Amino acid sequence: MNGGTESAQGAKKLLDIQNLHTSFFTHFGEVKAVDDVSLYLDRGETLGIVGESGSGKSVTMLSVMGLLSENGRVVSGSVTLSGRELSNLPEREMESVRGNEIGMIFQDPMTSLDPVFTIGHQITETIMKHKSVSREEAKARAIEILSSVMIPSPSRRMGQYPHEFSGGMRQRVMIAIALCCDPDILIADEPTTALDVTIQAQILDLMKDLNKRTGTSIILITHDLGVVAGICDRVNVMYAGHIAESGTVRDIFHMPRHPYTWGLLKSVPNPKRIVKERLVPIKGQPPDLLKPPAGCAFAPRCEYAMKICLAKRPPAFDIAEGHAASCYLNHPDAPRVPDAPVRAGV
Ligand SMILES: Nc1ncnc2c1ncn2[C@@H]1O[C@H](COP(=O)(O)OP(=O)(O)O)[C@@H](O)[C@H]1O
Ligand SMILES: [Mg+2]
């Protein structure tokens, strides 16, 4: 665990992102992929970041990790890890943060396992890169970590290549690599998207178990609100580079206060399948981030949009402690908020 001096108030906040703006500079202009995002992760908790494809989930986390592509840049904002500012760290120190303090499972399969090296080699190399240990010690640690992610016969598996592993087993190996230097935080970007439902449930159980057993804090990125219900403590709903709504899992599933969250709730199957229901996809497309709308980014798709929504971006309205929604329907002078769909059994 990372020590450091923290005020009593901020003692629990492990990662704190404040007013992050990240853009990509392209031939067509500036793509504002992350446009004023603030969120935090407490020690020991599991945080979900949910939103449709293109909402800025991956770019937010790649900004934290200092891993943006060449045309991407953090334009402004602050990212602190246990109170230490990360956004201006030299690359060498950032490399150490990436190995030792934050482990990430990437969405992009190109950055995943290397087909020409054995699994054992890949884990051992990662450990030796970040820790001053002998090859023998690194091997022993690799076997231990493979066994902790429930890979059967880990010693034998060390000598095998990625193609000898099933999709679910490869994902376990990815988690093992992200965890092999005991990071405080595991960021898992869509870790179950390519897997079938049964394997998906096993991987989520594994992460939940890791969080309980080791206290590793987790950020789980997904486009599927159903996935966060069973594993997360809190949720940030992202839309077009902003946080639309944030709250506990209960807040988001039982008292959602943003029409985009309502749309997501109606478009995913109930994770507990208590009631049979019709799934309704959200109509329309997210805005073009090269020309973001002046008002609320969701307004063009929102059936409750008012005049102000088209003109002015809504601030985050506090609904209750720890629950906020960036939607004018929560303004005291707004018309009564319609009954939101809620989920039973979450
Ligand atoms: N290298 C890049 N150049 C230009 N635009 C990019 C680049 N990478 C991502 N984007 C844009 O940033 C936005 C957010 O992307 P991303 O964070 O990957 O979304 P997601 O929520 O699906 O993870 C998208 O509009 C995407 O097209
Ligand atoms: Mg993504």
Image: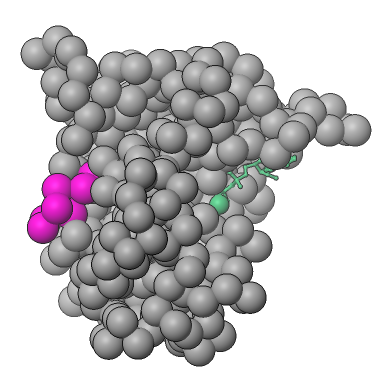
Image coordinates for residue 342, horizontal then vertical, percent: 24, 55
Q: How is the image coloured?
A: one colour
**In the rendered image, the vertical position of residue 70 relative to residue 200, given as above or below:** above
Q: Name the residue rendered at 33%, 50% in the picture.
A: 133
Residue 30 appears in view: yes
Is residue 100 inside the magenta stretch?
no
Q: Is residue 250 left or right of residue 29?
A: left
Image coordinates for residue 301, horizontal then vertical, percent: 58, 44
Image coordinates for residue 149, horizontal then vertical, percent: 26, 71
Q: Name the residue rendered at 18%, 13% in the picture.
A: 5
User: How many labels, in total?
Assistant: 0
The C terminus sits in image quarter: bottom left
- Of 115 and 320, nearer the camera is 115
Residue range of the region highlighted in magenta in the rendering: 211-218
- Of 158 and 222, nearer the camera is 158
User: Which quadrant would residue 100 be assigned to in this image?
Assistant: top left
Residue 298 appears in view: no
User: Which quadrant would residue 259 be assigned to in this image?
Assistant: top left
**In the rendered image, the vertical position of residue 128 relative to residue 11, given as above or below:** below
